[in-house]
Amino acid sequence: MSLGEFSLIERYFSEPAPAGALGVGDDAARIALPPGTALVACKDLLIEGRHFFPDVAARSLGHKALAVNLSDLAAMGAQPMACMLGLGLPRVDEAWLAEFAQGLHALARQSGCPLLGGDTVRHDAGVIVSVTALGTLPVDHPGLRRAAALPGDDIWVSGFLGAPDIALALLKGELTQNPALLDRLRSSLEYPVPRLSLGRALLSLAHAAIDVSDGLAQDLGHILMASRCGAILEEQALPVHPALADIEPVRLRQAILNGGDLYELCFTAPAAKRDQIDALSVKLAVPLSRVGSITNSPGLWLKDRRGQRLAVSPKGYDHFAGHA
Ligand code: ADP
Ligand code: MG
């Protein structure tokens, strides 16, 4: 690569490691686990043309590549500790790299998740970004597992639903152009905020949790499958993003139930925790909505505004759907 692989790494990806840790520059990184913790690890892979547009703002890509992993740590209730970056680049574009690195390092600093290493290779067929995030959980806590929902649990969702899905549809030209609306929704798609403090606080309140990356129906469906139970959602309780009031109702329902890229947390908790969860919402200034309940019988149902029960199919995003 023109700048040279090693000077590129040195210039853009060598932030100082935290005290006592070994970061970028040796054969591997080293970091001490805080006493009494277990290691939690996750990894996401983002490919140009599949997960992001070729002309996406590089800063947004740097942010999002880390954010989607922090969201997975949040959904376990874990505390971030460090991250690693795998990068495939068709060319060395320094302006692009500077923006990308800023987006990643800014979120890394903000969330206490410094970049400690990675690998950089040339990849002619487009940009590939893969971040591995490492975090910790108390050694005696299994984390917020998908399999831990119980019949009778309330179902909760953080934040608002629908915005990134509508933003994506506007960018793709699937909805009539509306620059003012796109302005309001764009950051939800490009700069998702991982719910880390919420996830950690839920360790003592929630049973199961998942982050909504592929759509509420599909991701809640993973909890139901793992926990061998069903659920009913109340349509009127679903927290629709306030900017979406004018979206046609059928399209809106699709955005709310099946829209991905959201990175809010969906979690289940016993009814006895309602007051504490409401108080947590105030304390963290994060909207938390009670949207339904876990049932004994399998299946996912939506009770609409007229009280009718509709079966919900988990049609979120599936990379292999139709490619059997
Ligand atoms: P090796 O050949 O031993 O795998 P590299 O030459 O690939 O080592 O990497 C040199 C150092 O730079 C290592 O510490 C590695 O973790 C780090 N590194 C390489 N690419 C990245 C990247 N994209 N982000 C952060 N660190 C990186
Ligand atoms: Mg290498």
Image (cartoon, rainbow, N blue to C red):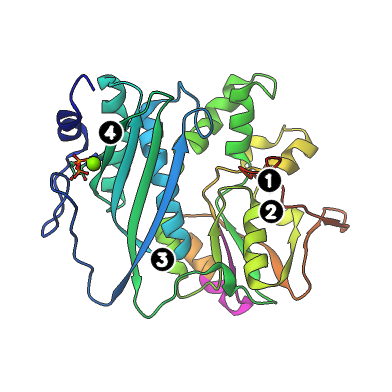
Label 2: which secondary element: helix
The numbered mark at residue 258 is 1
Decide: marks 4, 3 in contact (CB < 8 A)? no
Q: How far separated are the C-alphas under marks 1 and 4? A: 31 Å
Residue reaching furthest front?
A: 324
Q: Nearer the viewer, residue 306 or 82?
A: 82
Instruction: Classify the position of the C terminus by image quarter.
Output: top right
Mark 4, residues whose alpha carbon is within 10 Å: few (<14), some, or many (≥20)?
A: some
Image point 60% across, 38% down: which residue? 163
N-term-proximal mark, 1 vs 4: 4
Q: Which residue is mark 4?
A: 102
Horizontal and vertical percent for residue 27?
16, 49
The amino acid sitting under disc 1 is: Asn
The amino acid sitting under disc 2 is: Ala
The amino acid sitting under disc 3 is: Arg
Q: Is residue 193 visible?
A: no
Q: Which residue is mark 2?
A: 217
Q: How far separated are the C-alphas under marks 2 and 3? A: 24 Å
N-term-proximal mark, 2 vs 3: 3
Image point 23% across, 46% down: which residue? 117
Label 4: which secondary element: helix
Decide: marks 1, 2 in contact (CB < 8 A)? yes
Q: Which residue is mark 3?
A: 200
